[in-house]
Image (cartoon, rainbow, N blue to C red):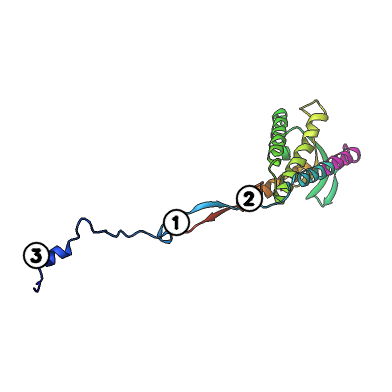
Amino acid sequence: MISTQGSPQTRDDAVPSPGDAVEVPVAEPSEAASVDEPAVAEKPMGPRRIGVLLAVALLAFLIDLGSKLLVVARLENHAAIKVVGDVVTLQVIRNSGAAFGMGQALTVVFTMIASAVIVVIWRIARRLYSLPWAIALGLLLGGALGNLTDRLFRAPSVFRGHVVDFISVQHFAVFNLADSAIVCGGILVVLLSFRGSNPDGTVHQQGGKGE
């Protein structure tokens, strides 16, 4: 018997019976749309960098303290010393404010802020594995300790002590080496953050490709 197009036999053959298996295409994993998600590299093996942090902080603190003792003994109540003409000079200024002479009436507030910064840095140090972060935080810690020492032990009183500034840049400000350490440490922290580096040694990277 010959079946013609559209005959009952042809139509019956074209319709699957209830018992016939129907294949459903399944997308391969490679066909699935990938989503951009931040990837975190594994923490590299190595020692914690607390020793580096403390060494940098101690060095910055001692250099700042030594420079202040020297300029107070040799330059206070004397004429300014020209280093680069009138652009950069050395002259002792007692500063009751923050870095670069800002906030003259907030001495106690800045003392408390410096103390809080030291506590935060020490908490971060417990999971510190990155050498660049250790250097950056060491500069911040050393600078904060340098100016905090002035706040605590210099006149006129505890928590209200005036910071010794002596580097004067024309049309800019008068500052000290502790301020310089804080600025350098802060800049390094910003650069490391932009690069995705974390204090614990991990690195945030943008992984994956869009559809």
Counting from the top left corner in percent of width and height, residue 112 is at 71, 30
The numbered mark, 1 or 2, whose residue comes first in the sequence reads 1
Counting from the top left corner in percent of width and height, residue 87 is at 78, 50
Q: Quadrant of residue 118?
A: top right
The numbered mark, 2 or 3, whose residue comes first in the sequence reads 3
Against 72, residue 85 (above or below) is below
Assign a secondary structure to mark 3.
Answer: helix
In this view, which residue lies farthest toward the bottom?
2
Region in magenta: 63-77
The numbered mark, 3 or 1, whose residue comes first in the sequence reads 3
Residue at 20%, 55% in the rendered image: 18
Is any atom of residue 144 visible in this view?
A: yes
- Residue tagged 2: 202
Marks 2 and 3, how far apart at CA: 70 Å
Q: Amino acid at mark 2?
A: Thr
Marks 3 and 1, how far apart at CA: 48 Å
Marks 3 and 1: which is nearer the front?
A: 3
Against 115, residue 173 (above or below) is below
Counting from the top left corner in percent of width and height, residue 188 is at 68, 50
- Residue tagged 3: 8
Prevailing secondary structure class for the magenta stretch in the rendered image: helix
Q: Quadrant of the C terminus?
A: bottom left
Q: Amino acid at mark 3?
A: Pro
The mark found on residue 34 in the picture is 1
Image position of 20 (left or right of 99)? left
Against 135, residue 119 (above or below) is above
Q: Amino acid at mark 1?
A: Ser
